[in-house]
Image: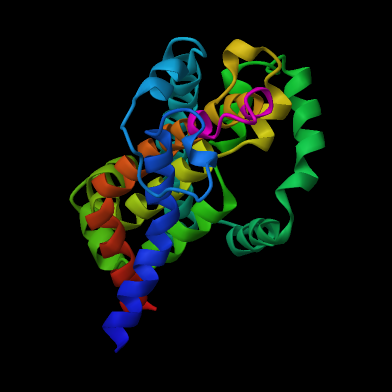
Amino acid sequence: MLYATLVIGALLALLPMVWMVSASLMPQGEASSYPPRIFPRAVTFEHYAALFTRLELGRFFINSSIVAVTVTFTSLFINSMAGYAFAKFHFRGRDRVFRLLSTGLVIPVQVAMLPLFLLLKELGLINTYWGVIIPGMASIFGIFLIRQYVMSLPDDMLDAARIDGAGEFRIYWSIVLPVIRPILATLAIWTFLSTWNDFMWPLIVLSEESRYTLPVALANLSGEHVQDTELMMAGSVLTILPVLIVFLFLQRSYVQGITVGSVKG
């Protein structure tokens, strides 16, 4: 009974995604027909072709890829170093600084948007990729996540490396990073997903249409082609596809990170 309930729940969760893909392959107007259809009468890729030719969606796809990949790799590097420092280094005010950072988790992101925008404006980074990338290069959540994981590493292992003459960066790069790979995969999926789907901040920072990310570009297209359901579904499929690929690529490490974290908890 339990497995049957889980299977039914999984099918209900997948149904909207299946219809989205199916609608993107329907001829124009068929997705809005009555009674509604789940599968197309005839498969067509004209909407995907229109996105990359007439609407030049490929440019926005590249913009989102540049921003999301840069933010993901940079944040993994910075957050892992900061989390390692807060977990294993003993310096004056460490716990006080970490508690102060942790309070930032309860502050809504929208509160910081105006001062952050004014700061980037003074730096001349408005309407640039860096204006979108820099705020995501480190996060309190990422530092917190890495710190909690690194705290479980035995100090004896790190001390043994120091006795052998390894420097702190060598210890971080050769010992800490391989061990925390599962939590890095979890953080990578989280960061890539949130950056790829981010709509508000790129909309605020970017004013030139050629620099728009995919969510911003699709929002503009939905206003211009509000009746073209099939075209919008094709755009949605292209938006979800990279996130799905990243998740499938890191799935094993992601599950391992959740499993190990639950055991340690």
Tell me: residue 252, above or below residue 50. Answer: below
Residue 62 location in percent, x, y? 44, 19
Q: Quadrant of residue 136?
A: top right
Magenta: main secondary structure: helix
Taking the view exactly as shown, the residue that stands out farthest to the front is 34
Residue 101 location in percent, x, y? 65, 56
Q: Is residue 226 magenta?
A: yes
Which quarter of the image is occupied by the C terminus? bottom left
Number of numbered discs overlaid on the protein picture: 0
Viewer-proximal residue, 107 or 225?
A: 225
Q: Is residue 254 left or right of residue 99?
A: left
Residue 140 location in percent, x, y? 58, 52
Q: Determine if residue 167 is in view.
A: no
Taking the view exactly as shown, the residue that stands out farthest to the bottom is 1
Which quarter of the image is occupied by the N terminus? bottom left
Tell me: residue 112, above or below residue 161. Answer: above
Viewer-proximal residue, 238 or 208?
A: 238
Residue located 72% across and 18% down the image: 123
Tell me: residue 55, above or below residue 14. Answer: above
Q: Which residues are magenta?
A: 222-232
Residue 256 location in percent, x, y? 26, 63
Viewer-proximal residue, 216 or 80?
A: 216
Residue located 35% across and 51% down the image: 184
Residue located 23% across and 62% down the image: 157
